[in-house]
Image: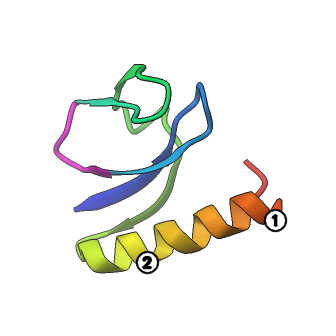
Amino acid sequence: MWFIIICPHCNLLQTVRADERYHTCYKCGVTLRLDYKKIKILYRSNNLKEVNYVLLRLKEKQVMGELKL
């Protein structure tokens, strides 16, 4: 399973695997402990191509200012 999460420090949208316990943000370098009760999951799916497609659409909305997080 794959999730789309948002970094709480720099607001970067990222794809992570559900079985990961820690993830390093690509932009700010912060190591996030993936406690899924505390981190906001924007999307989840078993299909990686679908997750990447949704990630691109969410990033477009974030750039246009339509995505309120």
Q: Which mark is residue 53?
A: 2
Residue 23, quarter of the rendered image:
top left
Q: Position of residue 14 (x, y in %)?
A: 43, 49
Element marked by disc 1: loop
Left or right relative to 57: residue 67: right
Q: Which of disc 1 and disc 2 is earlier in sequence?
A: 2
Task: Please give the name of the residue rendered at 19% of the width and 39% of the height, measured from the top-left corner.
Answer: 20
Query: Is 60 placed left or right of 34 in the picture?
Result: right
**Kind of residue at disc 2:** Tyr
Disc 1 residue type? Glu
Q: Is residue 20 magenta?
A: yes
Residue 43, given in percent of the width and then of the height, sits at: 46, 64
* Residue drawn at the location 60% of the way across and 66% of the way down: 58
Q: Are marks 2 and 1 in contact (CB under 8 Å)?
A: no
Regarding mark 2 in the picture, which secondary structure is present there? helix
Q: Is residue 14 above or below residue 20?
A: below
Give the magenta part as a residue range: 16-21
Residue on which disc 1 sits: 66
Mark 1 neighbour density, 10 Å: few (under 14) some (14–19) many (20 or more): few
Between 36 and 22, which is closer to the camera in this rendering? 22
Q: Residue furthest top?
A: 30
Q: CA distance from mark 2 to mark 1?
A: 17 Å
User: For the point 52% across and 35% down, which residue is it?
Assistant: 7
